[in-house]
Amino acid sequence: MLPLDCDKHVKAKLETRGVRSAEEALKKSELDVIELIDVSLGKASKALRQIAKGACPKPINAFQMKEKSAGQKGGNFIKTGVKTLDEALLGGVPVGTITEFVAPAGSGKTQMCLGLVAQTCAPKNFGGLDASVVFVDTEQTFSSNRLAEIAKKRFPEIYDKDYYKDGNNNDSVSNFGGMDKDAEMRLEKLLAEKVFVVTPQSLQELKVRIENLKPALTQSDAKLIVIDSVARLARAEGGIGAGSSSSESLVKRQNILSSIAAALKRHAEQLNVAVVVTNQVTTNTNINSNCYNSNDPAKANMVSRDSQVAAALGTKWAHCVNVRISMSGAIDGKADGKREMRVVKSPRTALSRFLYRITASGCASIDID
């Protein structure tokens, strides 16, 4: 939450009365402030103006944004492991934005997330960010064993003790300080100190945890927030997809989702972290498949041209994400077979499609013939 930026005497009085953030103060009128802390109209007006000015994001021009981006070179993206997707996104999942992977069950959403976790935690000289991760696990599918497997397969010289038994202790590895006994220790450190798992049980709890996440992100030097998935809690409480409850309940849930999205955007922009969320799908029988990618807002959440499958959570949520990538189940009927991935929304690349496969190292690209 943003601190109170005003006269220290007024600030002390407001905090004594329980108003400890700019958000709380700006919900009050001048008369509310006068009654609350017993000051004149002039002081109340001045205090609210100061607080509003302090809370308002400072505008920057396009050149400053370019310079800022250049100064962060190397830390602007997190590689997904799907080479063709990383190339299309000009490096990988961008930091400072919300990226959504939407797909039916069994398509590899969680595998993609675990791959991004391993990539974020890896040392910088191996293409990682050497940072920590906050993993919000609403699906109860987070697996430390699977994360360890992906990390060992992607970065054997860092985490796999067996790597050094095959005579791989070359100069580049030696410079890293790699030894078989140290590899296991680094893997334990990855699991114990780099990845923080949160398991909220309701949509309201998720909202509270996300809104109050900033101190934890700062203290742990986190560069990635993963929510797997947002839709699970919303659907569990009803009002999303089939079997919806009353319209009033649905509006309430949409407002909570909007608050969650706003908090995630704030963390992403202020702390320069990547936010990755997964979403489920629903069948939309009211939309003509020929209208895929239509400009009609009602069709903004369509993710499949052929099956009329749409992302859950509706159009309002669709406008909250910066990048949306859809994933499909196996297209050749095999558990380890080819799958399709589409970029359906991105300010960085044209709409495009790729083939991928789930492997021991997570999601990996397949060349299209």
Image (cartoon, rainbow, N blue to C red):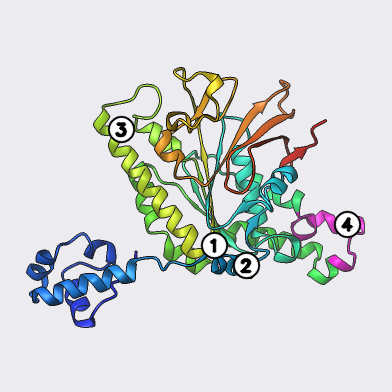
Percent x, y of residue 357: 73, 35
Marks 1 and 4 in Cβ contact (< 8 Å): no
Residue under numbered circle 1 = 222
Of callouts 4 and 3, the N-terminal one: 4
Residue under numbered circle 3 = 250
Give the SS element for disc 3: helix
Q: Which residues are magenta?
A: 155-172
Q: Nearer the viewer, mark 2 or mark 1?
A: 2
Q: Nearer the viewer, residue 8 or 52?
A: 52
Q: Nearer the viewer, mark 4 or mark 2?
A: 2
Q: Residue at x 49, y 45 (%)?
A: 321
Of callouts 2 and 1, the N-terminal one: 2
| Whether residue 116 is situated above or below residue 293 in the rendered picture | below
- Please indicate whether residue 362 sits to the left or right of residue 50 in the image: right
Of callouts 3 and 1, the N-terminal one: 1
Of callouts 2 and 3, the N-terminal one: 2
Give the SS element for disc 4: helix
Marks 4 and 2 in Cβ contact (< 8 Å): no
Measure how far apart labels 2 and 3 are at the Cα level.
40 Å
From the image, which quarter does the N terminus lie in? bottom left
Label 4: how many Cα within 10 Å (few below 14, some 14–19, many 20+): few
Give the SS element for disc 1: strand
Measure how far apart labels 4 and 3 are at the Cα level.
58 Å
Percent x, y of residue 3: 32, 70
Is 162 one of the magenta-colored residues?
A: yes
Percent x, y of residue 57: 39, 65
Amino acid identity at mark 3: Leu
Q: Residue at x 41, y 46 (%)?
A: 200
Is 88 one of the magenta-colored residues?
A: no
Residue under numbered circle 2 = 72
Q: Nearer the viewer, mark 4 or mark 3?
A: 3
Measure how far apart labels 2 and 1 are at the Cα level.
15 Å
